[in-house]
Image (cartoon, rainbow, N blue to C red):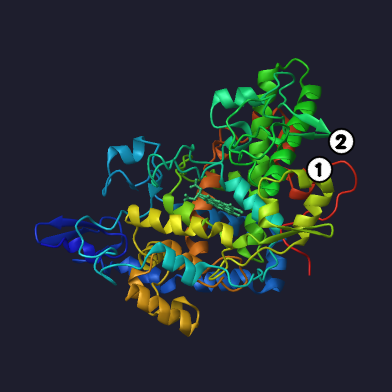
Amino acid sequence: AENPCCSMPCQNMGVCMREGDSYSCDCTRTGYYGQNCDIPEFWTSIKVALKPSKKTTHHLLTNYKWLWDIVNKIPFLSNFIMRAVYKIRSSTVDSPPLYHTGHDYTSWDTYADRSYYTRALPPVPPGCPIPMGTAGRKELPSPEYIAETFLARRKFIPDKRRTNVLFNFMAQHFTHQFFKTDFKKGAGRTWGDHGVDLSHIYGENVERQHQLRSFTDGKLKFQRVGGEEFPPSLADAPVHMIYPPYVPEQKRFAIGHEFFGLLPGLFVFSTVWLREHNRVCDVMKELHPDWDDERLFQTARLILTGETINIIINEYVQHLSGYNFDLFWDPELLFKDQFQYQNRIFVEFNHLYHWHPLMPDQFHINGTTYGMKDYLFNTDLVFKHGFGTTVDAMSKQIAGQIGPKNIGPVNLKVAVETIKHERNLRMQGLNQYRKRFGIPPYKTFLELTGGDAEMAAQLEEAYGDVDAVELYVGLMIEQPAPGSVTSETIIEMGGPFSVKGLLSNPLCSPQWWKPSTFGGDAGFRMVRTATLRDLFCRNMDGPCGLVSFAVPE
Ligand code: MNH
């Protein structure tokens, strides 16, 4: 007989357990009871009645600028709201995690085996009649068909919020320190360490880190080109890097992450963080003449970790959210609470961050246009145009909109692979995830496509039932939420993973969050005041042009 859990009967995060031909739902601490955990307890019904919907909250935060202009200036109010954002977002993530890909249920390995990504929802149960449980078609269309029909770019669609190419590369650069799928072991496995560890700058293990270090004054190895610091050549720092055969030896650079020779934008970020590291080492050596190389290196790494988090919250997430409330990073706001300073990367977080639509097909630098073929692995253009000019150009070019039919040709196969991975992992559909993250499931295809009737009809043809729409596909075809860069589901799922990941960093713990961790007041100040503009302008020869995450109007 069919597993009755296949129809996902348990609501409100109740856990389904098969009992022969029947099932039970474990409703413990869900605030609901009944066969399917669908009847609210008294206090739950009060809470539900009073709680504004996620849509309402989003609307409030992205409108009423005059109101937020006042709130932002009153510390009592802005602290209250910022703390609420930290608390509400991070409490949405299970910590410790409940599921991973090794088992369909909670197991010791879920907690202990860090070579797995964790999962917010367990897989579609085994032995279900059809791929998505009981909803939709017996057989889903091929990943190739799905990608070509719904995801492939016809004509470049620019982002309405004027997100630029610098943002695009920050996204890719920043997230690849923790999204590191170990494809040899499977799509649910990772070779990363589950958080903001700057392994993309310093390498994922001590051997790689040692190759990248100069062992004098805490600094990283570098080479001078035209008077400016750049990552060392592979000959000087022999680490494993992925380059195609046609890239000549002297144009191969040694970087923390082995993929980062791929794109000039990643090379730019690798370069600026390298310069920042060595600059911070100089400052620290001045303050602490007695420190050895090791201590200078380790302290600079912590300072750069803090700078990263500050820039990500104050500027990157700020831009992404479109909120008129000014976000900021203050770990102290959580010191009165119980808070788990531990983090795991969820496979759903990885998939929702496949923002390949951001990538334009061409890059404009100082009057020259590069097609994708001339851009991939071509770090030469950074030297040809100059570092500053390249950064300015990336700040002035609008990136693609994260939405349907906007993935360029080079990345379409990545989309195909992602769909295949989701099917291998038996991931539940978009609507199940919407419920898990507190937003109502879509009732119709038309609602999902935001009124695009043609696409809704094609989707219905493909999936049969809106509950069968796959997670990644659904995330990519939703329209951006009003005022934001990404869709409602990406915000409501990504927000929790992102806030939890940033605020659970050990730097944020009451024990670590103090000047001595960062070599004293000067280092602590660097952490708390870091900005994107300073990061670039302090580490650049010549005039500093536009450094921003959006193209100004
Ligand atoms: Mn991208 C994974 C190519 C831009 C985010 N990306 C992959 C994979 C390839 C790839 C290949 C592995 C696919 C698979 O087998 O599942 N990505 C590219 C190329 C470009 C690119 C060629 C630009 C051109 N990628 C971007 C951008 C982002 C991004 C921009 C924005 C954040 N990509 C990801 C994420 C993964 C990924 C996240 C998953 C990484 C992992 O799990 O290891």
Are the residues at dot 1 and dot 2 in contact (C-beta closer than 8 Å)? yes
* 143 with respect to 272 (left or right): left
Query: Which kind of residue does numbered mark 1 sit on?
Result: Phe
In the depicted structure, whether residue 357 falls above or below residue 504: below
| Residue, disc 2 | 226
The spot of residue 122 in percent (x, y) is 31, 53
Of 422 and 438, which appears nearest the observer? Answer: 422
- Tell me, yes or no, if residue 216 can be seen here: yes
Q: Position of residue 251 (x, y in %)?
A: 72, 36
For mark 1, does the 10 Å Cα neighbourhood hold few (<14), some (14 to 19), or many (20 or more) residues? few
Kindly tell me whether residue 355 is visible in this rendering.
Answer: no
- Read off the residue under disc 1: 383
Residue 32 appears left or right of 315 = left
What percent of the width, then of the height, locates residue 110? 33, 41
Position of the C terminus by quadrant: bottom right
In this rendering, would 119 be left or right of 360? left
**Residue at (32, 75) in percent of width and height:** 465
Vertical side of 395 occupied by 543: above or below: above
Query: What residue is shown at x 50% (from left), y 55% (from top)?
Result: 414
